[in-house]
């Protein structure tokens, strides 16, 4: 298992995995497959070359099996914070510790970044496996965003979590 920050050259594999994520687990993302399916490869290259984000990828035998993004805040008063977003591991690779390794790498990067004191994330309130993983890594719940997402007239709550470094 190789975990590293994705680069422009990884855009094609990232696009494929991102679209799979949006189709497989629509409730886990604010964005939708319908919104991103027609994005060009350049859209994904731009995400991976954005200086305010680090997207980590988990590779096995050259294949991208999981991703998570550390999104840095841009406003001066928020620069002590960062956000963990877009966590996804392919269905067939779940339960093998890939998500944990990805998040650990993101945490290590955040600890090395100047001024970062805390990492925020949101997770579907009914996603027990993900919440357990985040708790095991030190994240704690500080709130519930009621009716955060609306998918086909169904509302989903999100649990808001933070890790103080």
Image (spheres, rainbow, N blue to C red):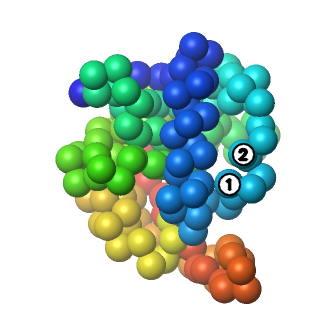
**Splitting the image into 4 quarters, where does residue 54 fall?**
top right
Residue 119: image x %, image y %?
Answer: 51, 48
Task: Name the residue: 35% across, 73% down.
Answer: 128
Sort mark 2 into few (<14), some (14-19) or many (20+) by Cα contacts within 10 Å. Answer: some
Q: Nearer the viewer, residue 160 or 154?
A: 154
Q: Quadrant of the N terminus?
A: top left
Task: Name the residue: 45% across, 49% down.
Answer: 88
From the image, tell me which residue sits under label 1: 33
Residue 74: image x %, image y %?
Answer: 75, 36
Please determine whether, in this image, residue 36 is positioned above or below residue 54: below
From the image, tell me which residue sits under label 2: 37
Residue 159: image x %, image y %?
Answer: 52, 72
Q: CA distance from mark 2 to mark 1?
A: 6 Å
Task: Name the residue: 46% across, 39% down.
Answer: 67
Please say whether residue 107 is visible from this viewpoint: no
Please determine whether, in this image, residue 130 is positioned above or below residue 68: below
Please determine whether, in this image, residue 26 is positioned above or below residue 9: below
> What element does badge 1 sit on?
helix
């Amino acid at each position: 298992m190789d975990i590293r920050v994705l680069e422009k050259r990884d855009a094609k594999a990232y696009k494929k995995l991102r679209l799979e994520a949006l189709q497989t687990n629509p409730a886990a993302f604010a964005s939708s497959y319908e919104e991103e399916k027609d994005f060009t490869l350049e859209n994904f290259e731009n995400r991976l070359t954005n200086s305010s984000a680090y997207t980590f990828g988990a590779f096995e035998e050259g294949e991208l099996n999981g991703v998570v993004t550390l999104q840095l805040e841009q406003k001066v008063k928020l620069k002590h914070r960062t956000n963990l977003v877009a966590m996804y591991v392919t269905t067939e690779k779940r339960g093998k510790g890939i998500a944990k390794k990805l998040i650990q790498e993101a945490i290590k990067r955040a600890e090395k970044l100047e001024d970062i004191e805390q990492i925020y994330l949101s997770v579907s309130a009914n996603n027990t496996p993900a919440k357990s993983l985040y708790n095991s890594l030190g994240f704690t719940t500080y709130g519930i965003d009621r009716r955060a997402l609306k998918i086909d007239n169904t509302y989903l709550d999100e649990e808001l979590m933070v890790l103080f470094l």
